[in-house]
Image (cartoon, rainbow, N blue to C red):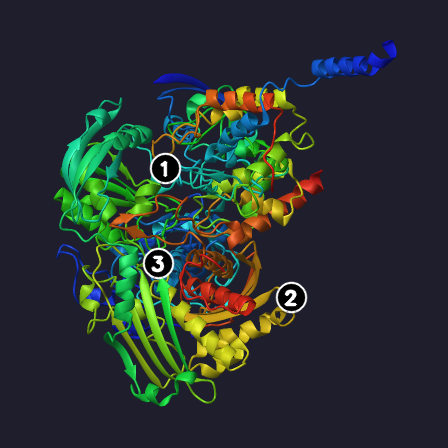
């Protein structure tokens, strides 16, 4: 890492660099077109250290994390960055999650959020500078006291050392140091000077998550708090016609039952003293719904329609080379493939929830939120307040995977609508697991149709690819980012492929469907990587080439990160050459969110299902701030990705109704369905860190299926894998 | 003269002895088989057969799908540590949460499997053979089988199976418990005949 | 509403609740013990796992009226069991948790497994832990932590 004297983030150049590279949340345009009302000031260019770090008298260093912690480890890795530059004693560090406030906005995206695998990537420099500035102020204070120069001082483990035997604890300097001017320029460490960054540092929140003391949003308990459940229409957009709540109200502890508006349609809220009372009351409601004039989405019908669309050219996402090149290829040298992908629910383990207390001229909210700025603004809007009158606490979340970042903030909106009628009383809105499984905001259904023309050397010469699926951005404040009828999030992973394919055409159809959809961990890469990596594997098989070697040949010369991981994977997966009978290996590689991943899995078929004995993963994420976190993210992300393959990994609709209700009908992977071991190898790098939250997800399903194809000779193009 | 009636005397004595010691075959075989048909219809109904599996898992529901959450038989049919049958199933039905319950909830032993490894119910003949095989049925004779059908807790449960999570009542076996016991009695009194065949 | 006397983590607690209330919600709302989690409400995920007379029990489906005099141990009290302590410390040592929401239930299930089978095979682990969902898929590290705990228990034996 170069010695970096630059301290101000150059946001414009950052935006240009990352807009092209960042998949998922492409909301950098937000900075040019404010989404929220003018009351939201733009994020500050300078971040005051005292909003991020506080040294207590007892020596504890409290570091404020500007992101939600929802499993990805950011409450450990961001403090590591700051603590290292600050030379703080790591054993004294405590992490806290930041409430909603301007200073905590993502430096790149300009809103307070977590997503797009951007926490470390966007806040690495920021937290380094915060740590360095804090250190500088502590040194300045010590130097003043000792009447020496700052150059004569050094720091280590929360102590400043001066000439002679002088020393002073940060704890004793902190109060006065905080009054010093914040330096404009600070020197950052060389990579060789890192003591914490780059080390396998155990999580700070382990103990509390192992002894039951960690509180999540759902665990919040406040004096006088009420519980709210909402009965939603059985078809999206339905409206309440009439409510018979006599039976519901007869239960002891039911406080109120009333209709609330939704963005589309309406619902019925039940407020009670206890969860179980609210649940029973809701079960007893007799609601007459108006479902007229609504599209009743149906999976079977949608599939048929999508397949029809896939057979036609869509809006052009990319068109490189000669569209007619395919005509030169004899049919025997072509592959034509159609892929089907279902709706997927995120189903984070902690059911969705939000707690709001309205006090007339102000309000307080407690939300395990991925989108604090937007959630706060919506609560304020509902309550008729300015956003800065809503004190917004970020609670720890039991998973998110994108589900807790909705552009319409529908969960906090419901909570605020209900809290409005209970002035002075905190109201905790809970979505039951059934509400969650049935409540929409899914990874959309997709159909892909691909035609590949293969050249004499076995490499693809022509590639025509049609993607059909709902646009995630349409109908949201980000809709203006849809260019020429193409939503980038639907084609990422295909359109921007690093494979060298001279005549390459990708088009997209975005049907409008009455099912709310949302980004699901790794977004468009979930289906695009599956298609690309299974087709490339098929090409490799046809060419009788080793799947790693074939990819290395097919990749563009400048695909540096992908090349580095394929090479590392090749080295670390020697086991694939000596597998016993009945076992096969499968390989996949993919780059997303600027991180490259290559994965090899060892698979057999047990009881008619894939048994994944092991996975070997090679990662290039630039500098790995916490290799232990990176390892965990990859072990876990692979497992999460297997949601796409498990038998009950699909949300389906029949005549507008969701057919699944809970984990009995939609069952994410259990322990026996993920790899038994996962060894993760990180390419050594001093490049700026890139994300690890989403990059593991796209590679696992194609890798497993590529192995299965070796075992059975079949191609698997319809997910989930109901049969093997 | 005595010498000529001795064989007849012995025969009559034999007949009297046999009639005193044999099971009273007051019901003929045809009626016994007809009664067995009724018994069989209960045994292969979901409330019973779902726990008489040939696999390492129970079934649930009227469609007899594999029980969710990967619950397994375990070494003795009571599940495994951490995931026992009684981890969820208590000693009576929990209607408020939709979990059925009864005393000592567990799977029938593999010796009492009434379906094949592909979850298909066995034939009437095969089930009858299994049920009457004293090396497999915990050494129950006809009267013991009757008592089992009349009184065993988990058998009685089938007619009081509680509510599903959605609040609806679980479906009952095709005949009432009284009819089931009566059919069993008839079948036992016929000497527990089994249909021929596989 | 009815009164119930429950023994939770060695202490007697009295609650006054609707008899049909699952034990989970009695623990969380009446006794304010939120370490036991609500994940699904139909016993499919294991986040609500407690011990009742030593048996791992999914508290979201057991009405409080069916508990009786049986002794309840929750995640908040499992450290008073030597196997519980070993498991919790193995979980920390192996950096198992990510979001952590399922881990109370995972630990309670693992403790039940290890108390009955101190030296479990891979199959034992999969069968006993096979009903516990982890959306973050920390399963690989859960296996490692159980193996580590098993070694420590063997070592102590």
**Circle nearer the N terminus (1, 2):** 1
Subunit that carries the residue with mark 2: A
Residue plotted at (62% across, 39% down): C114
| Picture coordinates of residue A147, whole percent (x, y) | 40, 59
Disc 3: CA contacts within 10 A as few (<14), some (14-19) or many (>=20): many
**Circle nearer the N terminus (3, 2):** 3
Q: Classify A401 as above or below A689.
A: above
Disc 1: CA contacts within 10 A as few (<14), some (14-19) or many (>=20): many
Give the Cα separation between the discs numbered 1 and 2: 50 Å
Residue plotted at (53% across, 34% down): B85
Q: Would you say the residues marked 3 and 1 are in contact, meaning their CB atoms lie under 8 Å apart? A: no
Give the Cα separation between the discs numbered 3 and 2: 33 Å
Left or right of A136 on screen, residue A418: left
The residue at which mark 3 appears reads as A342
Q: What element carries label 1?
A: helix
Residue furthest right as drawn: B3
Q: Is mark 3 on a helix, strand or loop?
A: loop
> Which is more foreground, mark 3 or mark 1?
3
The residue at which mark 2 appears reads as A581
**Hey, which quadrant is residue A357 in on the image?**
top left
Q: Classify A213 as above or below A159.
A: above
Asked if badge 3 and badge 2 are on a common chain, one would say yes
Q: Which of B122 and A578 is in front in this view?
A: B122
**Circle nearer the N terminus (3, 1):** 1
Subunit that carries the residue with mark 1: A
The residue at which mark 1 appears reads as A219
Q: What element carries label 2?
A: loop
Q: Which of A2 and A319 is in front in this view?
A: A319
């Amino acid at each position: 890492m170069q010695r970096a004297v630059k301290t101000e983030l150059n946001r414009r150049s950052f935006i240009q660099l990352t807009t092209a590279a960042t998949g998922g949340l492409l909301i950098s345009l937000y900075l040019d077109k404010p989404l929220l009302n003018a009351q939201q000031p733009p994020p500050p260019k300078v971040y005051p250290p005292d909003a991020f770090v506080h040294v207590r008298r007892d020596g504890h260093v409290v570091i404020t994390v500007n992101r939600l912690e929802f499993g990805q480890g950011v409450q450990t890795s961001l403090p590591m960055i700051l603590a290292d530059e600050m030379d703080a004693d790591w054993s004294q560090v405590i992490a806290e999650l930041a409430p909603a406030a301007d200073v905590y906005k993502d430096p790149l995206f300009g809103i307070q959020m977590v997503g797009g695998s951007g926490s470390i990537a966007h806040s690495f420099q920021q937290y380094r500078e915060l740590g360095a500035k804090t250190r500088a102020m502590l040194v300045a204070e010590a130097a003043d006291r000792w009447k020496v120069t700052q150059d004569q001082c050094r720091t280590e483990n929360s102590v400043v050392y001066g000439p002679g035997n002088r020393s002073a604890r940060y704890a004793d300097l902190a109060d006065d140091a905080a009054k010093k001017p914040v330096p404009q320029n600070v020197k950052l460490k060389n990579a060789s000077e890192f003591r914490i960054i780059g080390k396998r540092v155990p999580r700070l929140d382990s103990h509390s998550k192992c002894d039951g003391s960690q509180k999540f949003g759902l665990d919040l308990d406040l004096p006088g708090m009420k519980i709210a459940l909402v009965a939603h229409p059985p078809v999206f957009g339905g409206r309440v016609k009439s409510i018979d709540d006599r039976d519901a109200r007869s239960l002891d502890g039911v406080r109120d039952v009333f209709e609330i508006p939704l963005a589309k349609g309406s619902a019925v809220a039940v407020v009670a003293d206890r969860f179980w009372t609210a649940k029973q009351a809701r079960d007893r409601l007799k609601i007459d719904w108006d479902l007229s004039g609504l599209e009743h989405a149906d999976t079977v019908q949608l599939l048929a329609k999508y397949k029809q669309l896939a057979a036609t050219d869509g809006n052009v996402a990319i068109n490189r080379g000669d569209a007619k090149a395919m005509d030169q290829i004899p049919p025997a040298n072509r592959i034509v493939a159609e892929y089907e992908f279902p709706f997927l629910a995120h189903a984070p383990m902690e059911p969705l929830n939000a707690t709001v207390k309205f006090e007339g001229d102000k309000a307080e909210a407690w939300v395990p939120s991925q989108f604090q700025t937007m959630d706060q603004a919506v609560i304020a809007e509902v309550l008729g307040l300015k956003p800065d009158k809503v004190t917004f606490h970020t609670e720890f979340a039991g998973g998110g995977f994108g589900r807790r970042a909705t552009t319409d903030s529908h969960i906090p909106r419901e909570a605020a609508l209900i809290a409005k009628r209970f002035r002075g009383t905190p109201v905790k809105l809970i979505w039951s697991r059934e509400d969650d499984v049935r409540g929409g905001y899914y990874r959309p259904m997709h159909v892909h149709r691909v035609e590949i023309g293969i050249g004499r050397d076995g490499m693809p010469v022509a590639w025509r690819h049609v993607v059909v699926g709902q646009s995630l951005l349409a109908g949201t404040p980000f809709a203006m980012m849809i260019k020429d009828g193409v939503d980038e999030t639907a084609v990422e992973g295909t359109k921007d492929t690093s494979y060298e394919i001279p005549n390459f055409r990708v088009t997209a159809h975005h049907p409008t469907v009455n099912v709310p959809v949302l980004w699901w961990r790794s977004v468009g890469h979930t289906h695009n990587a599956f298609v690309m990596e299974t087709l490339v594997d098929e090409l490799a098989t046809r060419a009788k080439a080793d799947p790693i070697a074939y990819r290395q040949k097919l990749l563009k010369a400048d695909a540096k990160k992908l090349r580095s991981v394929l090479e590392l994977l090749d080295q670390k997966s020697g086991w694939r050459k000596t597998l016993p009978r009945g076992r096969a290996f499968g390989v996949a590689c993919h780059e997303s969110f600027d991180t490259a991943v290559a994965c090899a899995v060892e698979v057999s078929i047990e009881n008619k299902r894939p048994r994944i004995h092991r996975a070997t993963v090679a990662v290039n994420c630039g500098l790995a701030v916490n290799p232990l976190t990176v390892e965990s993210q990859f072990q876990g992300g692979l497992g999460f990705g297997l949601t796409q393959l498990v038998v009950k990994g699909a949300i389906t609709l029949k005549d507008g109704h969701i057919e699944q209700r809970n984990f009995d009908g939609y069952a994410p992977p259990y322990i026996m369905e993920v790899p038994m071991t996962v060894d993760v190898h990180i390419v050594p790098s001093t490049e700026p860190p890139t994300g690890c939250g989403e990059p593991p997800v796209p590679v696992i399903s194609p890798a497993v299926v590529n192995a299965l194809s070796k075992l059975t000779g079949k191609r698997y193009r319809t997910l989930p894998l109901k049969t093997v | 003269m005595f010498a000529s009636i001795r064989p007849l005397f012995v025969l009559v004595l034999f007949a009297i002895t046999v009639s005193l010691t044999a099971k009273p075959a007051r019901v003929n075989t045809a009626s016994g088989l007809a009664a067995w048909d009724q018994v069989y219809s209960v045994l292969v109904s979901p409330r019973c057969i779902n726990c008489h599996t040939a696999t390492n898992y129970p079934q649930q529901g009227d469609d007899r799908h594999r029980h969710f959450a990967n619950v397994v038989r375990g070494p003795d049919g009571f599940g495994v540590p951490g995931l026992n049958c009684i981890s969820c199933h208590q000693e009576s039905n929990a209607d408020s949460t939709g979990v059925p319950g009864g005393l000592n909830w567990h799977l029938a032993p593999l010796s009492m499997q009434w379906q094949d490894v592909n979850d298909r119910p066995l034939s009437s003949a095969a089930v009858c053979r299994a049920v009457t095989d004293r090396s497999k049925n915990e050494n129950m004779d006809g009267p013991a089988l009757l008592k089992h059908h009349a009184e065993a807790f988990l058998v009685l449960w089938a007619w009081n199976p509680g509510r599903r999570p959605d609040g609806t009542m679980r479906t009952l076996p095709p005949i009432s418990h009284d009819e089931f016991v009566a059919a069993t009695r008839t079948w036992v009194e016929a000497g527990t005949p089994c249909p021929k065949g596989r | 509403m009815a009164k119930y006397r429950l023994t939770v983590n060695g202490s007697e607690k009295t609650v006054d609740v609707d008899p049909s209330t699952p034990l989970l919600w009695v623990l969380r709302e009446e006794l304010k013990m939120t370490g036991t989690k609500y994940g699904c409400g139909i016993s499919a995920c294991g986040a609500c796992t407690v011990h009742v007379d030593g048996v791992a029990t999914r508290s979201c489906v057991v009405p409080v009226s069916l508990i009786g005099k049986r002794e309840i141990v929750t995640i908040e009290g499992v450290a008073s069991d030597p196997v519980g302590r070993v498991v919790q410390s193995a979980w920390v040592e192996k950096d198992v948790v990510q979001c952590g929401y399922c881990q109370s239930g995972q630990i309670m299930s693992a403790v039940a497994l290890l108390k009955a089978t101190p030296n479990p095979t891979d199959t034992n682990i999969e069968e006993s832990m096979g009903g516990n969902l982890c959306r973050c898929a920390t399963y690989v590290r859960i296996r490692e932590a159980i193996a580590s705990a098993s070694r420590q228990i063997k070592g102590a034996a």
